[in-house]
Image: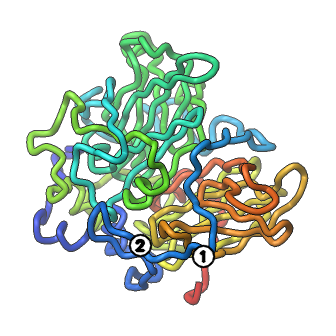
Amino acid sequence: MYRFFGRHLVGPRHVVARVFAGAFVLVCVAGLEGGCGEKTNITVRDLKQSVTGTADLPDAVVANRPGNPPTSYQLNCPWGQVDPDPADNPAWAGNLGPDQIPAIDAPVWRPVASPDLPLLNSEPVLVVERAGQVRVMPIRIMLHHEVVSMCWNTPSGAQYTYLTYCPLTDAGVHFLSSKSCNAKLKFGVSGSVFNWNLVTYDRATLHKPPLVSYVQMYAGGVFGDCADPDPMTVYMTWGAAWRMYPDGKVLSKNTGRQPAGGYDFFNQPYWTYWRQGLSVFNFPLSNRDDRLTDMAPILGVLVPGARKAFSLRSAPYVRNEIIAGQRIVILNDSGVGVAEAFEAVLDGQPLTFSFAGRERHGLSIYTDDETGSFWNIDGIAVGGPLVGKRLPRATTIRSFWFAWAAMFPQTDLYVPPPSS
């Protein structure tokens, strides 16, 4: 946890945390636009609970997941604003040393069906996918580590990647790397923040100036290097993840550096901050935007020449957009805490999407007007003429509004009407 400026992020633990189930729900009381009182047809109590759905729609679960096709465009590094010298940038702050927040260098994975933490359906997780393999990381664990290194078996050989999660901005980003899976000097937590965002560092360069640091919100190295972002990072609830990815793996609590109290759900270290907002700290911020409240969750979409944020109200919605010439669809299913964006063009055919309903597992199904195919929340066609096809996933970041607006001060914003 952060201890910047002598402030220790603690607060009411047991009583409040039992009422608000994890960070996904905690952000509601911190300023989610539209409130959190609206209900969906999914309620969660325990891991074995069934949900109300319909057998009339095809299952959202895909046994043999097709690969994620590349987008038709490329993003240039850096994604957002950056100063080449952090020593002269007032948006930099922090007084922790490198690795004071211990990254997970050798994660242990368990089957999704048998996690070694008693996870609640409503608590948030991050999901990443590579070569058809799915890994799930509970935010409850990421709060204490912020970076996890991973090795994947792919058709082209072993590949090293790392996932970052910043509790101050509620943003998770998955990065690809050319490092070897056997490299001892991987990426760690630098102990600094930029516009409140986690800054990771390459341990191999710690004593070899200039220090190569990556700021996760814009993926730009402060000395000109760039990390390669992977759009396969999805924020959702555990209840959706274990249904959606029955063959996936979930991060074990055996991290090698457990906090003193373990990964206790009822001891959320960032509760005070999530509840009270930016006033808890005195970090500098280069830009403030009052179109939304600071802690309102958004999904930010990045395309060449434009950045656009979509407010994640409690009511689900589908939004068909054209952003800087790119045809994009946003699928916001707040019932299971997931929002994703895809290129809405397949094999040259523009597609227009709408919500079709929930299938028997309680997972969302969408349909396109042009072919009548059915799609799951991962952009995979699970029924109809295009079954087996997959939409290219757009590069997105889910975060608090204040963090996105600081990194992308020229951002556009979509706020759904109250009835959405």
Q: Can residue 357 be seen?
A: yes
Where does label 1 land, which residue? 357
Task: Report the front residue among 264 and 365.
Answer: 365
Res. 146 image quadrant = top left
Residue 229 left/right relative to 336: right
Residue 111 left/right relative to 365: left
Give the residue type at disc 1.
Answer: Gly
Query: In the picture, which quadrant includes the C terminus?
Result: bottom right
The spot of residue 373 in percent (x, y) is: 76, 64
Measured Cα–Cα span from mark 1 to mark 2: 13 Å
Which residue sits furthest right?
348
Residue at x-position 75% and y-position 67%: 321
Above or below, comparing residue 235 to residue 143 in the picture: below
Q: Can residue 92 be seen?
A: no
Res. 350 image quadrant = bottom right
The spot of residue 323 in percent (x, y) is: 77, 60
Give the residue type at disc 2.
Answer: Val
Q: Earlier in the sequence, mark 1 or mark 2?
A: 2
Residue at x-position 30% and y-position 39%: 94
Task: Report the front residue among 293 and 301.
Answer: 301
Which residue sits furthest bottom?
419
Residue at x-position 51% and y-position 56%: 398
Where does label 2 land, which residue? 51
Query: In the picture, which quadrant includes the N terminus?
Result: top left
Q: Residues within 10 Å of mark 2 (few under 14, many from 20)?
A: some
Residue at x-position 36% and y-position 73%: 28
